[in-house]
């Protein structure tokens, strides 16, 4: 049993992970009951709420995407999942991660963007997050987060 510490630096925004999920209803059984809250054949609930990532959040590739009219990806931003004592978060933007040892914290080399690049990152994130209702000008910035697992 060991504890790993990981540090993440991000130029962008950090939002509660739950903001990137939506609840959908799926059929509780295969009988497809027409009325009532429970199936008359098996007794299971007619619908079960399931939490699913929003279509813009590509969990497998750790990106948030904005699609064009013919559903091709026109813009995308990197995403990192962070869990710590404050909860579960997604960092979106320019992300640098590094592992640290308990004894002898080592610095993470950072070859990040310049101040000029930060302006482009902000523009990109606003384009992607604003239509989702997740853009907050004041949340954009440089964030340093510790992840323990
Ligand atoms: Zn049933």
Image: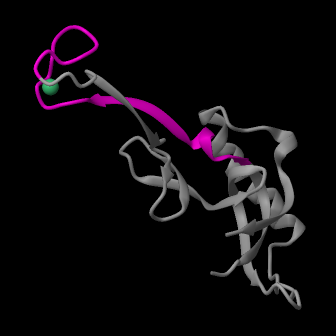
Q: Is 144 in front, or is 67?
A: 144
Specify the color scheme. Answer: one colour
On the image, which quarter does residue 90 sit in? bottom right
Q: Quadrant of ligand 1?
A: top left
State the residue at coordinates (69%, 58%). 83
Q: Is residue 20 magenta?
A: yes
Q: Is residue 149 magenta?
A: no
Left or right of 37, for residue 146: right
Residue reaching furthest top? Answer: 35
Question: Which corner quadrant holds the C terminus?
Answer: bottom right
Q: Is residue 13 above or below residue 110?
A: above
Q: Is residue 106 above or below residue 136?
A: below
Q: Is residue 46 above or below residue 6?
A: above
Residue 56 location, x and y as percent? 50, 46
Residue 2 location, x and y as percent? 67, 81
Residue reaching furthest front? Answer: 1
State the residue at coordinates (85%, 60%). 143
What segment carries the magenta color?
15-41
Question: Which corner quadrant holds the N terminus?
Answer: bottom right
């Amino acid at each position: 049993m060991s504890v790993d510490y990981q540090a993440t630096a991000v130029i962008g925004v950090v939002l509660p992970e739950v903001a990137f999920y939506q609840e959908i209803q799926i059929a509780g059984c295969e009988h497809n009951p027409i009325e009532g809250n429970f199936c008359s054949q098996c007794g299971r609930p007619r619908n079960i709420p399931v939490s699913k990532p929003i279509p813009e959040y590509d969990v497998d590739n750790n990106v948030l995407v904005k699609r064009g009219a013919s559903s091709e990806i026109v813009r995308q931003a990197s995403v990192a999942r962070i869990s710590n004592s404050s909860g579960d978060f997604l960092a979106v933007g320019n992300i640098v991660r590094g592992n640290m040892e308990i004894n002898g914290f080592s610095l993470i080399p950072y070859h990040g963007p310049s101040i000029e690049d930060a302006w482009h990152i902000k523009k990109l994130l606003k384009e992607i997050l604003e239509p989702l209702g997740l853009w907050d000008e004041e949340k954009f910035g440089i964030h340093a987060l510790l992840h323990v697992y």
